[in-house]
Image (spheres, rainbow, N blue to C red):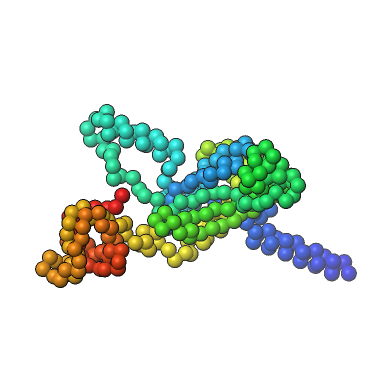
Amino acid sequence: MQKLNSRIAAGVASAACLLAASSGFAANKEPEIPTCEKKIGTLAVTEPENKWWRALNLESPEALIKVFVSKSKCFTLLDRGKGMSAAQSERQLASSGEFRGGSNIGKGQMKAADYVLVPDIVNQNARAGGKNFGGLLGGVIGGAAGAVIGGVSLKSKTADVVLTLTDVRSTEQVALAEGHAKKTDLGWAGGGGAFFGAFAAGGASSYANTEIGQVVTMAYLDAFVKLVHEARNMDHDAKTDNVSQSVTMTKPGRMYAEPNIKSKVVRDLDPGMMLYPSGEKQELFWKVSDELGNEGWVPSTLFQLAK
């Protein structure tokens, strides 16, 4: 009987170890940010409009997610926040002629974002009668805003968050991942943990130095792991899968059946007409279609990119 009990105990312990290893937050094991060998595309991180983090005395989750993205090497990270504002100031100085010759700052140099990533919390109604953050602060910051913050519970120290990845060109939502974490997930941290040091350095110190901030961090990491897995496996390329930017006729002209002016005329084109390039080009001619479905070739000297 004693041997049988020992075997049962060993089996239970083994199962517990397997369960811990399979979860995103294994006990006593510091979590890892997923990495990629190949870039998925360029990315801008944009904070949600509801500003839920202010009531928790946290910084914007934008800073937190930027650390994940930077360390993962899955995307080329573009700064559309404070860095962008500083860059615009430099560009204004350049355009006013203040810089020395050869400074090489001007239009046409900025990279475009393929995707926008928005970090938010799960929208829950405050049903718990004050148990969650929305119920606690709903009367202070307004019913709607209070309900939005229902994804973070101060009493149970839990957080439910969501990351949304959107294609900039098509505005198609290409990936969405929810993350969950609770206080007990922090057993590996030992009261702080070296893992959180990177977030303090990245401008997200409140996520590193407060318990609720650490819980929110782990919830976002849970969502980011899922998002990266989904993004790596998606059959989508933001540049090649989207149609080319539309163009506008600046001069009167004609649409031809072939890429030369001696071919059959498909139709006459007036200034201001919108055309949609297919991506095919031959010398100065672009293959386009109009809003009525006509297709043909137009010299690129007659149009400009639509603004």
Q: Considering depth in this image, is 74 or 170 the residue closer to the camera?
A: 170
Q: Is residue 263 left or right of residue 66?
A: left
Q: Is residue 55 visible?
A: yes
Which quadrant of the figure has residue 239?
Answer: bottom left
Residue 110 at x, y percent in the picture: 33, 45
Q: Residue furthest right?
A: 1
Q: Is residue 190 left or right of residue 261?
A: right
Q: Is residue 34 visible?
A: no
Q: Is residue 218 above or below residue 200?
A: below
* Residue at (74% x, 49% y) in the render: 128
* Residue at (27% x, 28% y) in the render: 98
* Residue at (49% x, 51% y) in the render: 117
Q: Is residue 84 above or below residue 263?
A: above
Q: Considering depth in this image, is 95 or 70 the residue closer to the camera?
A: 95
Residue 43 at x, y percent in the picture: 43, 50
Residue 274 at x, y percent in the picture: 28, 58
Q: Is residue 210 above or below residue 127?
A: above
Question: Where the N terminus falls, by quadrant?
Answer: bottom right
